[in-house]
Image (cartoon, rainbow, N blue to C red):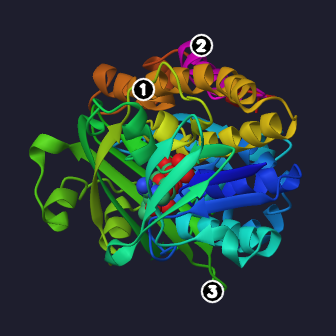
Amino acid sequence: MRVVIAGAGIGGLTTALGLHAAGIRDVTLAEAATDLRQLGVGLNILPHAAGVLGELHLLDRLTASCVQTRELLLCNRFGDLIWREPRGKYAGHDWPQLSVHRADLVAVLAQAVRERLGDEAIRLDSRVVHVDTDTGHVHLSHRGGRTTETDADVVVGADGIRSAVRAQLYPDEGQPSGNGLVMWRGTSVAEPFLTGRSMVVSGDDVHRVVTYPVRRFPDGKVLVNWVAARPADLETAVPEDALRYFGDWTFEWLDIPAILDAADDVRMYPMVDREPLPRWSFGRTTLLGDAAHAMYPMGSNGATQAILDAAELARVLAAGDAVESALAEYERARRPATTRLQASNRAHGPERVIALAHQRAPTGFDDIHDVISPDELAAVADDYAAVSGLDQRPFHPADR
Ligand SMILES: Cc1cc2nc3c(=O)[nH]c(=O)nc-3n(C[C@H](O)[C@H](O)[C@H](O)COP(=O)(O)OP(=O)(O)OC[C@H]3O[C@@H](n4cnc5c(N)ncnc54)[C@H](O)[C@@H]3O)c2cc1C
């Protein structure tokens, strides 16, 4: 079986490794970029997706460069604690939660693909422009206007939120839609905070700051990934002006303005997602990762779900059924689950308790249970864990 994957991002690379592990070796990744540049900042991989990487024997390499997340804290913009829970192995899961720089993750995945499938498996400067969904005939374009064609038994559109394969399947869809927020993102070298492995989401009714370390340095410092989200209608092109809003978000245990100030490359992104699709697979072609189900970045599910898609697609293709029925099985396993997550993330996922705390106590509180009951808090966290397929929660904060 020959598989052509559009996009050597996290989903595409993991799919190639999953196929290789399942015995399918004729795999080509067509990547539009001319190199797998060190773009992006941090992302999180939840334990069930870390398990997929573990079974691909990648965790040793990854954990050499990333941070095993120990806990998640949700708090208001004054640092008053709303929710604190252990994560990954610290919560009793079999696999860790990983906080990783996207560039480090892509580098580990790409190196493994080259070692296992050969240097030729990743074709850079190869943009998929058209797929014949019934025959698997793929048209590619390259720099300088050159075009080539190739054939596949299966074509996987893992080409991200602005997927060309998806645009071909759904030509009237247009651009990804936004929720009225923009995200300023950066990384900063800083002293570790809390456990040195803590992820903190702080906010008010609409503003959010997410901070977590993604690399540890020998001198004890860490590289902190941060995202500061705010309404697009307040927007300015100047990061210093935008970030001034967060200038007094200094807590006893976390100095957010200092972290934001320390970044040397700060970029703004709109917070966008895609509508859930009624169907991913047509003939020999299917969609995967953000191309299939781009969602707002809440609850650490962007890369996680792409990795879970990859594992499932490799499993069904290796089972040896006809391609159309294998793709139908993949879609049955993955589409309803990711559709629920897209909807949940539009309602702010687990972070909706932050807005709730702000509505009920805009100037802060001493004890969150005066503001939101323990049952209400646990219900939000449990609901989201179930929706993201991570509902193995051996204990609740109240048990500790
Ligand atoms: C450059 C970049 C930086 C990112 N930074 C972050 C980040 O800091 N934090 C975060 O949470 N998420 C980030 N993301 C998104 C995150 O990687 C995804 O949400 C998630 O990992 C799902 O992965 P994916 O493989 O579906 O998509 P992606 O990781 O987006 O990969 C898609 C790949 O397809 C390639 N591609 C696009 N069009 C074509 C085409 N027509 N033909 C062939 N190849 C094509 C792209 O160059 C890219 O390599 C980033 C994505 C990109 C592309």
Q: Nearer the viewer, residue 32 or 175?
A: 32
Q: Is residue 378 magenta?
A: yes
Q: Image quadrant of residue 347?
A: top left
In whole angstroms, how far apart are the C-alphas of marks 1 and 3? 37 Å
In whole angstroms, how far apart are the C-alphas of marks 1 and 2? 15 Å
In whole angstroms, how far apart are the C-alphas of marks 3 and 2? 42 Å
Q: Residues within 10 Å of mark 3 (few under 14, many from 20)?
A: few
Q: Nearer the viewer, residue 193 or 173?
A: 173
Label 3 within 8 A of ligand 1 by Cβ: no
Q: Say if 196 sits above or below 398 in the image.
A: below
Q: Image quadrant of residue 254?
A: bottom left
Amino acid type, residue under disc 2 in the picture = Asp
The kind of secondary structure element at disc 2 is helix
The kind of secondary structure element at disc 1 is helix
Residue at 87 percent across and 35 percent down: it is: 320
Q: Which residue is mark 2?
A: 375
Q: Residue 248 appears at what percent x and percent y?
A: 25, 55
Task: Give, as a single range, the part of the protein colored magenta.
Answer: 374-393
Amino acid type, residue under disc 3 in the picture = Asp
The kind of secondary structure element at disc 3 is loop
Mark toward the start of the polypeptide (1 vs 2): 1
Q: Say if 377 sits above or below 311 in the image.
A: above
Amino acid type, residue under disc 1 in the picture = Arg
Q: Which residue is mark 3?
A: 219
Q: Which residue is mark 1?
A: 352
Q: Is residue 216 magenta?
A: no
Residue at 48 percent across and 41 percent down: it is: 291
Q: Residue 207 appears at what percent x and percent y?
A: 28, 41
Residue at 45 percent across and 32 percent down: it is: 351
Q: Residue 10 appears at what percent x and percent y?
A: 60, 56
Q: Are marks 1 and 2 in contact (CB under 8 Å)?
A: no
